[in-house]
Amino acid sequence: MKKVALVSIHGMGETQPDYADKLFARLNASLAENSSRLYCTAVYYQDLLHYNEQRVWQALGHRLRWNKLRRFMLFGFADAAALEHRKEQPHSLYHYSQLKIARALYLAKQQLNETGKLVLLAHSLGCHVLSCYLWDAQQAKAGLKPAAGIWRDIRRYQAGISGDVALTDDDIAFLRGDRLSTLITTGCNIPIFVAAHAQEQIIPFNKPNAGFSWLNYYDKDDVLGWPLADLSEPYAALVSDIDVNVSGGIWGWLAASWNPLSHNLYWQDKQVINQIINCINNTN
C-alpha cells in the first residue's frame, strides 16, 4: 500500500487524457527508491466539454484570423462558462466534473494505507473546479447543503463514485479532504471568478484539517495565473503564494508580455516539480 496519493486536475482548453503522464514519470524518476510510496492518478473532465466546443470551432473557425489564439480562447473560456452554466441542475457539467473528482479520490484511497495522505495538484481552471469541490464538501461537513454538485447528497451518487460498494463514513471523510495534506495550484484563475464579488464575500473553502497547506504558484507574465493571498484576509490565512518564472529560458522571448505557452509551462518548471517532490517526501 502507498503512503501518498497525488491526484492531478487539468486546466482550460484542449487537453488529452494523458496530460499528466510526463509529469508523473518525471516525479517517479526523481523519487527513485521513494517512488514506491507514491500513487499517481489524473482527473480528466475535458471529455464532458470537447464535442460541443469542437462543433462550434468547425462552424466558425475557418472564417477568422489568429486561429491558434482564437482556438485557445474558445476552448478555454467555453470550459469555464459551461461548468458554471445552470450548475444547480442535477445533471449539470458542474455536477459531473465533481463526480469525476470524487471517483478519482475514491480510487486513490484504495491504494493508500490507513494513514496515507493525499496531495492535490490543480492547474488553471482546474484550480477553480477543485476549489468549488472542496467548498461544497466543507459546507456539507458543516451540516450545510451546498447549492450545487454532488455534496448536496454524496451517498446518492455512490454508483458513480464507488460502484456497487457502499460508501463508508471513512470514504466520505477522505473524499471531503480529511487526509488532504497539500493543495498545489499553478496558473490559478480563481480571481477571475470572484473579482465582481464584494470583498467580504471572497471566502475560500474551510481548512479541511489542521495539517493542510495550500501552495499557489503564479508567473507574473501569465495573465491567466494569479496570486490569491491578497484577495481577502481568509485567503491570506489559507494560501501561500509563490512567484515563479516559468516563461524564462528558451520561451522567455515568446512570453515577454504574454503568450499562451507561458500558461502551460508550470509542470515543467524545476521549482514547481521540486516542491511536489518535497511534499511527497515530507508527507507522513
Image (tube, helix red, strand yellow):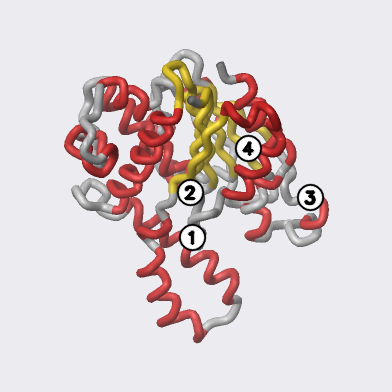
Task: Residue at 44% x, 46% y: name it.
Answer: 43
Residue 151 visible in the current orientation: yes
Residue type marked 2 = Leu
Picture quadrant where residue 151 is located:
top left
* In the image: residue 158, left or right of residue 196: left
Q: CA distance from mark 2 to mark 4?
A: 14 Å
Query: Mark 2 or mark 4: which comes first in sequence?
Result: 2
What label does residue 161 carry, if any?
none
Task: Residue at 56% x, 16% y: name it.
Answer: 284
Residue type marked 3 = Gly
Task: Residue at 31% x, 26% y: name it.
Answer: 171
Q: Mark 4 packing: few (<14 Cα in 10 Å), some, or many (20+)? A: many
Q: Nearer the viewer, residue 213 or 197?
A: 213
Q: Which residue is mark 2?
A: 125
Query: Mark 4 or mark 1: which comes first in sequence?
Result: 1
* In the image: residue 170, left or right of residue 22: left
Q: Which residue is mark 3?
A: 248
In the orientation shown, which residue stands out farthest toward the top?
210
Q: Which residue is mark 4?
A: 217
Residue type marked 4 = Tyr
Q: CA distance from mark 2 to mark 1?
A: 8 Å
Percent across and percent down for residue 82 are: 35, 58
Percent across and percent down for residue 79 are: 42, 58
Q: Which residue is mark 1?
A: 76
Circle 2/circle 3 CB separation < 8 Å: no
Secondary element at tag 4 = strand
Circle 2/circle 1 CB separation < 8 Å: yes
Q: Mark 3 packing: few (<14 Cα in 10 Å), some, or many (20+)? A: some
Q: Nearer the viewer, residue 205 or 172?
A: 172
